[in-house]
Image (spheres, rainbow, N blue to C red):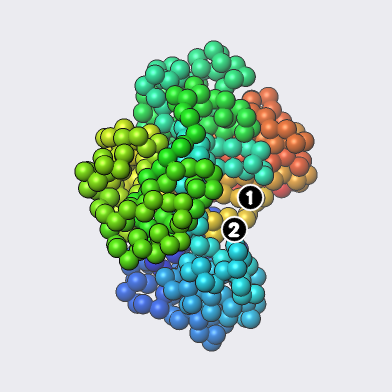
Amino acid sequence: MKIVIVGAGAVGGDLARNVSRRERDVIVVDRDPASAEKAQETLDCRVVVGNGVNPAFLESLGMADTDLFAAVTDSDQTNMISCLTAHRLGAKVKVARVRSAEYYRGDQLVLDGIDLAINPDVEAVRAIRHILWDAATTDVHEFAGGRVRVVGARVDDSAFIAGRSLSEVEKALGSRWALVISVIRDGVTYIPRGDTVVKPGDQVYIAGARNAVDRALAYVHAPVDRFKSVMILGANPTGQSLSRDLCALGVTVKLIDPDEERCRQASEELHRVLVLHGDGTDVELLKSEGIDSMDGFVALGEDEETNVVACLLAHTHGVGKTVCLVNRPDYVPLLPQLGVDAAVSPRLSTADAIARFVKRGGVVSTHSLGFSGSEILQFHLDESNLCLDKPLAKLSFPRDAVIGAVLTRGQVITPQGSTRLQAGDEVVVFALPEGVTAVENFFAKRR
C-alpha cells in the first residue's frame, strides 16, 4: 500500500510512525527543509522536501498509484487544496486535517473530492466524552459496531481483583469476569498471564462483549454515579464543543478561561454554561466555584504544564475524575502516578483516526493504546485464512499479542485454547509494538 503524508509536524510524524510499522511505501512531504531533516532522523520512511499543493510535485510522487493521501499540516487551506489536487491526479483515498468549523456543514466537509475530513478538536471531544461518561474508565474503544468493547480502568486499592492473580479472579468470578488483555504498571505495558498478580494502581484493559466488560468493571473500580457536574479549563473550540455535549446530557458545566474576549464569546454561544474569567490554577477561584463538589475536571488549555497543574489541584481537592489534554508523549506515563486519571491528545486521536484507513491482511480497524505504541486491531476472516478450524492452542500465534474477543455468528465470545476460528468471524487482538507486524502477517496468510 502506498501512502503519502503532507506535513512532517506532530500529527504527520505520529501518523507516519503508526503506518510505517506495517507499510513499506510511505512518503512524508514537508516544504521546510529543517522540518524534513528532523523528521528523517526519527522516521523509518522516505521524507522529501516539496510543496504539497504543487501539481507538478505531487505528480512526480506518483498520485495515480497512491492508495492513501493524507494532508495534515497546520493550515486547513493547504490541506484541502493538497487533497483536491491529489484527487484530480488520481489518488484513491484523500484525508485532510481541517480544524475550522466554517468549512463544515453539520459533520460533513462542504468540498467534494475529499473522502474524510478530520477535526482534531472533534476527535479530542469524542475521546473525552467517552472517558467522562464511562466514569470508571480511562479509555474506551469499540469494535464490531459497538458489540465488542476494550476498556481501560485503574485498579482501586479496595478492588476485588487487587492482590489476586488473574487465574484466581477467573476461578472466583466465572462468567461475571472478562478477559484482561494488557496491564500497564509503572509506565510499562505488557501482556498478563494467568499467574499475573494485579496490584492497586495498575491500569488494566478488559475486552469482551459490552455487557460483560461493563459488569467486570465493578471488580476493578469502585462503583461511581453518572457525572452531574464538570469544570472545564479552556474556552477554546474544544472546550466549547465539550461543554455543549455535556449540557445536552444534563451535566452542569462551569467553564474557566484567562482570556476575557474568549470568555465573552463563549458566554454568548453557551447559554446553559457558567463561563468564568480567571486562572484555572488559582486555588482560591477553584475553591470559591466549588471544585471540591465537582464530579469531573477537564483541562483543555493551550499550555500543557498549566493543564497538568490544574488537574493536580483538582485531584487534591477531591474531584472524582481528572482529564488532561497533552501532546508530549513523555508526559503521559507520569500523569497517572501524579494523580491525573486520563490524558487525551488531539494529535494522537487525529493520527489514529487516519491510520484506520490503512487496511492490510484483513484489518478492519485499529486503535492506538495511548502513546505506548501498542495497538488494538480488528480483523475479518474469510474462507482463505490459514488459521481457520484449528484450536487456538495449536496455532503459532505471536507471543507479543493476545486475542481479546471473537465475534462469531453475531455472538461475542471470550477465546479459550479450544476456540476455533471460522470464516466470517471478526477477531479483536491486542499487540505490543514489537508484535503488530507479526499479528498482521499471521492473519494475512492464505491457503
Using the image as rendered, state which of residue 239 and residue 344 is in the foreground: 239
Q: Do the residues labelled 1 and 2 touch (CB within 8 Å)?
A: yes
The Cα–Cα distance between marks 1 and 2, rounded to whole angstroms, is: 8 Å
Residue on which disc 1 sits? 363
Q: How many residues crowd around disc 2 within 10 Å: few (fewer than 14), some, or many (20 or more)?
A: some
**Could you tell me which secondary element the residue under label 1 belongs to?**
strand
- Where 104 sits versus 336, above or below? below
Which amino acid is tagged 2? Val
Which amino acid is tagged 1? Val
Tell me where residue 318 sits by quadrant: top left
**Could you tell me which secondary element the residue under label 2 belongs to?**
loop
Tell me where residue 295 sits by quadrant: top left
- Where 73 sits versus 20, above or below? below
Which residue: 45% across, 57% down? 270
- In this view, the residue farthest toward the bottom is 56
Residue 240 drawn at (x, y percent): 44, 57
Residue 182 drawn at (x, y percent): 48, 33
Which residue: 61% across, 75% down? 111
* Image quarter hosting the N terminus: bottom right
